[in-house]
Image (cartoon, rainbow, N blue to C red):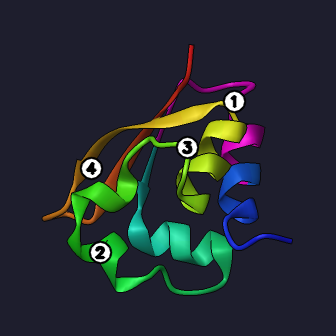
Amino acid sequence: MAKYDPLAKFLGDSARTEGTAILSLTQIEGLMGKALPMSAHRRRSWWGNDSYHVQSVAWQAAGWRVFKVDMARQVVTFIRAS
C-alpha cells in the first residue's frame, strides 16, 4: 500500500455522495495513520494538483483535486474533478 492510498480511498468512497470534502490536516493524518511531512503544514505548494508528486497523483487518481488550502486553519478543501 502506498503512503497516500488511505486518503485516496477515503476520497474515492466519498465520490459517490459528495462533491466536496473538507479535511483538516489532522484528519488526513488520522486516515493515513502517520504524520504528513512538515512541508504539507507549511507550504501551499505541497497541495498542488500536479502529476509528479505522489500525494497529488493519489487524490487525482481517486477523481478529486485540491480546490482550496487554508494554511492558517490547516484545512484542505477537495472537490471532485470534472
Q: Earlier in the sequence, mark 4 or mark 2?
A: 2
- Determine contact: label 1, label 3, CB under 8 Å: no
Residue 7 part of the magenta-drawn span: no
Q: Nearer the viewer, residue 76 or 46?
A: 46
Helix, strand or loop status at disc 3: loop
Which amino acid, mark 1?
Ala
N-terminal of the pair, mark 4 or mark 1, is 1
The percent coordinates of residue 34 (x first, y second) are 60, 86
Q: Tag 1's secondary structure?
A: loop
> Sequence-wise, which precedes: disc 2 or disc 3?
2
Q: Which of the two discs, 1 and 3, sits closer to the camera?
A: 3
Question: Is residue 80 or residue 61 the one in the foreground?
Answer: 61
Query: Viewer-proximal residue, 21 or 54?
Result: 54
Residue 6, percent from left and from top: 73, 63
Horizontal side of 24 relative to 79 (left or right) equals: left
Of all residues shown, which one is farthest toward the front?
52
Per the rendered image, the range of residues in magenta is 10-21
Is 23 on the left or on the right of 53, as rendered? left
Which residue has dot 3 on it? Answer: 51
Left or right: 63, with 82 as reference point: right
Q: Position of residue 32 (x, y in %)?
A: 66, 74
Can you identify the residue that label 4 sits on? 69
- Quadrant in the picture for residue 29: bottom right
Query: Magenta stretch containing residue 15, yes or no?
Result: yes
Q: Which mark is residue 41?
A: 2
**Amino acid found under the numbered disc labelled 4:** Val
Q: Which residue is mark 1?
A: 15
Rounded to the nearest angstrom, the CA distance separating label 4 from label 1 is: 19 Å
